[in-house]
Amino acid sequence: MKQTAVIVAPGRGTYNKTELGYLARHHAVRADLVGGFDDYRRAQGQTPVSDLDGAARFSATVHTRGDNASSLIYACAQCDFAAIDRSAFDIVAITGNSMGWYVALACAGALTPIDGLKIVNTTSTLMQERLTGGQAIYPFMDENWRPLPEARDRILSKMAEIDARPDHLLCLSIDLGGMIVLAGNAKGLAAFESEMPATQGRFPLRLQGHPGFHTPLQMPVAEEARARLPRSMFRQPDIPLIDGRGAIWQPHGTDTDALWSYTLNHQIVAPYDFTAAIRTAAREFMPDVFIVLGPGTTMGGAVAQSLILADWRGLKDKAGFQDAQNSAPRLISMGMEAQRAQVIAA
């Protein structure tokens, strides 16, 4: 019997040193798909994704550069989606985090794989050219994934206080499970980092190479992207999509003009609520499993934390989640070798 599955696509920051060679290791049989991505990148005067993936060494300046990283992650995720065993899994909905929304659009059929890459590459190139603002991350859950009393409100209050100062800009970028991703200008981020208590040995954590995603800082990017990317690219999805507000776009019932507008306006300039997307997926589709596409292994924690916040299947904390995983896995990460074997076609 098939298991029902919600697919979760990753965003930026998921292709790192350990992921080098991901396409070559896992997707040599998808030469046509990867070849199409390579041809598009060559036509733009950019390094093909297979060359980036096949480099002898990982280079932070090359592989984490926005226009390269986004296309690499997109290619890996699309190939992972194609590898899922459809005889074992009935995919009932697709969502993603931040840039993962573009991956989700293509996986669901609302964009062709190449048109999905065009959106990823266009927006990431525009952002790379401007590099406006930055991002940092701060938790409101403890290390056992239990929400700390009033912690989220305190973080948001501090952000608002800093944002109100002259020449300071700081605002919510992504609700990411038990983390707040914030974005702002240099003064706003520096103030937050100096005034918030250090916690868990690494927070506040600046996300290197990340501009101020999902904030008004990206309005020029959104305007230029809408000028370059036509509405005609968008089609009716074949599979329900859950966006960064937790809203559902249904097959045969989607206003494709509205989908274009959301994708190239709200999705770029307003906060992305990944937590709400996972909550909607859990409550509206009640899947047997969540499958997180690769590359990388960092998205699993954010999904699990979001499920805890949604009180899905009685999950309360990290220990309870791990116990549930050991007895009947409900979250499968394709970026983890042992887990990807559970979902790929033989």
Image (cartoon, rainbow, N blue to C red):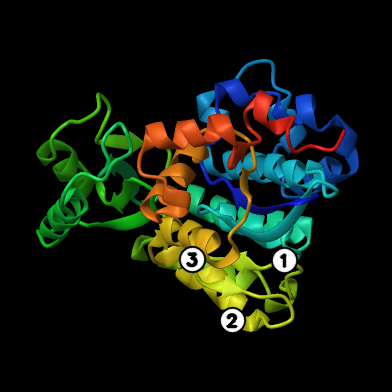
How far apart are the alpha carbons under marks 1 and 2? 17 Å
Residue at 73% from the left image edge and 24% from the top image edge:
54
The type of residue carrying mark 1 is Ile
The type of residue carrying mark 3 is Gln
Is 91 situated above or below 59?
below
The type of residue carrying mark 2 is Ala
Question: Disc 2 designates what residue?
Answer: 258
How far apart are the alpha carbons under marks 2 and 3? 12 Å
Camera-near label (1 vs 3) is: 1
Q: x, y (%) of residue 42?
A: 77, 43
Of the two numbered discs 1 and 3 on the same chain, state the one appearing first in sequence. 1
Name the secondary structure under disc 1: loop
Answer left or right for 335 relative to 126: right
Q: Report whether residue 223 is seen.
A: no
Of the two numbered discs 2 and 3 on the same chain, state the one appearing first in sequence. 2
Q: Which mark is residue 267?
A: 3
Is 10 situated above or below 166?
above
Is 167 situated above or below 340?
below
Of the two numbered discs 1 and 2 on the same chain, state the one appearing first in sequence. 1
Badge 2: how crowded within 10 Å, few (<14), some, or many (20+)?
A: few
CB within 8 Å, label 2 to label 3: no
CB within 8 Å, label 1 to label 3: no
Q: x, y (%) of residue 4?
A: 70, 54
Badge 1: how crowded within 10 Å, few (<14), some, or many (20+)?
A: many
How far apart are the alpha carbons under marks 1 and 3? 20 Å
Question: Disc 1 designates what residue?
Answer: 239
Answer left or right for 322 relative to 47: left
